[in-house]
Image (cartoon, rainbow, N blue to C red):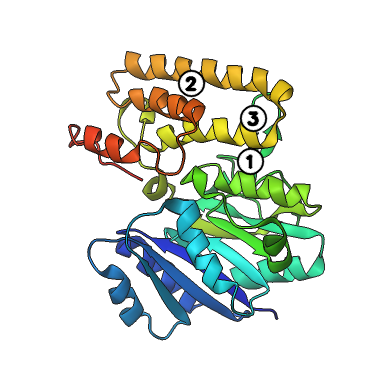
Amino acid sequence: MPSVALIILNWNGYHDTAPCFESLRKSRGVNFEIYLVDNGSANKEAARLEKEFCDLPLRVIALPENLGFAAGNNRGLEIALKAKAKYFLLLNNDTIIPTDFLKKMVTAMEADPTLGVLGAVNLYEADRKRIWYTGGYLNRSTADFTDPRHNTTYIPSDRIEPTDDVAGSSLMITRTALEQVGLLDERFFNNFEESDLCLRVRDAGYRIACHMGAFIYHKVSAATGSTGPAKIDINEYFFHRNKVLFLRKHWSFFAGAPVLAWHSIMSLRRYRYARSRGNRAAPLILWGLRDGFKQNYWKGSLPAIIEWRKSFPQQPVKA
C-alpha cells in the first residue's frame, strides 16, 4: 500500500490535536508520516505533542507566526514532497479518524488514476450521524458551493461521488496532481484556498470526488467559531474578501462582472442583517469586501482587525 504524508496544522490547539493524534495511533493498513506544522503557538505545545506522541512517525515544523491555513499547509507540503509519499492528506487538527479511514482513501485513489483530489465525509463530532460537508457543487452564476447532503443523516456507501470541491479538513491529493498544479495559493490565507486548488486540479484534467464510505468526525465549531447574533466571526472577513480573489482567478472579466456584483449585493445584505441583530462585528463583512477589491490579500487587514476586536472581550477571535 503506498504511503501517505499527513499535513496537520496546530495553532494553540493542543486539546484538539492530541485526540486527533490518538486516533492516528489506531490507524491501520497504510504507512503514513505526520508533518505537524505549528503555526506560531505561544505555549510550546508542539514540543509537548512531539514528546507525548513520540511513537508516531511525527515530524514537527515550527513556524515563528501564524501564517494561515494555506501558507501553513504549504510549509508542510514543501518538506513532505522531498520524501516518497504518493499521496498527501490535509487533515484538520480538530478531527478524529476511524481506524480504516486512510486505507479506504488510498484504496479508492489507487483504483482510479483519474482522481486528483479525494475528500471524505465530514460528520459533526457532536452529532456523529449528521453530515457537515461532503463536497460542494459550484453554481457559476453566484460562485457558491452547495452541498445537498449538508445537515442530513449519514448513510454510508461505497460511492465515489464527483464534486467540484471537497473540505480542506480532509483533502487527499496525488503527488502527480500536486506537482502539476502547485501548492495552495497563499494569498487566500484562510477560506477558498481548497476550492481554488480543486478547480486548478480539475482544469488540469483530473477528477474531484468525495468517498462516501470514508468519514471523519470534525469539531466544526472549533474551526469556525461563533460570535453572537448572526454568527459573525473573523472568518467572515476572509470569506467576503477571498470570494473576490476566487472570482478573479476562475472567471473571465465579462463572465465574472455580474457574479461579482451579486456577491457585493449579498455582502451588503448580510451586513445590514447583522447590524439589525446588534452584531458589533458586522463591519468585518465590509472590511473584507473592501480588501477584496483593493487586492489586499494574505493577512490583509487581520492585524488591524485583531486590535479592533480587542474591544469585544466576550467574543473570542478565531483566526
- Spatial distance from mark 2 to mark 3, Cα to Cα? 13 Å
Asked if 67 appears above or below 101 in the picture, the reply is above
| Residue 136 point in image, percent of width and height | 65, 41
Q: Nearer the viewer, mark 1 or mark 3?
A: 3
Q: Quadrant of residue 148?
A: top right
Residue 115: image location, x then y, percent: 77, 59
Where is 135 relative to 270, above or below? below
In the rendered image, which residue does mark 3 sit on? 143
Point out the image quarter for the C terminus: top left
What's the mark number on residue 149?
Answer: 1
Residue at position x 57%, y 78% in the image: 32
Specify whether 125 is left or right of 13. right
Could you give the CA–CA distance between mark 1 and mark 3, rounded to whole angstroms? 19 Å
- Amino acid carrying label 3: it is Ala
Q: Which residue is mark 2?
A: 267
Q: Secondary structure at mark 2?
A: helix
- Residue 123 sits above or below residue 281 on the image: below
Q: Residue 65 at what x, y percent from top left? A: 32, 57
Secondary element type, mark 3: loop
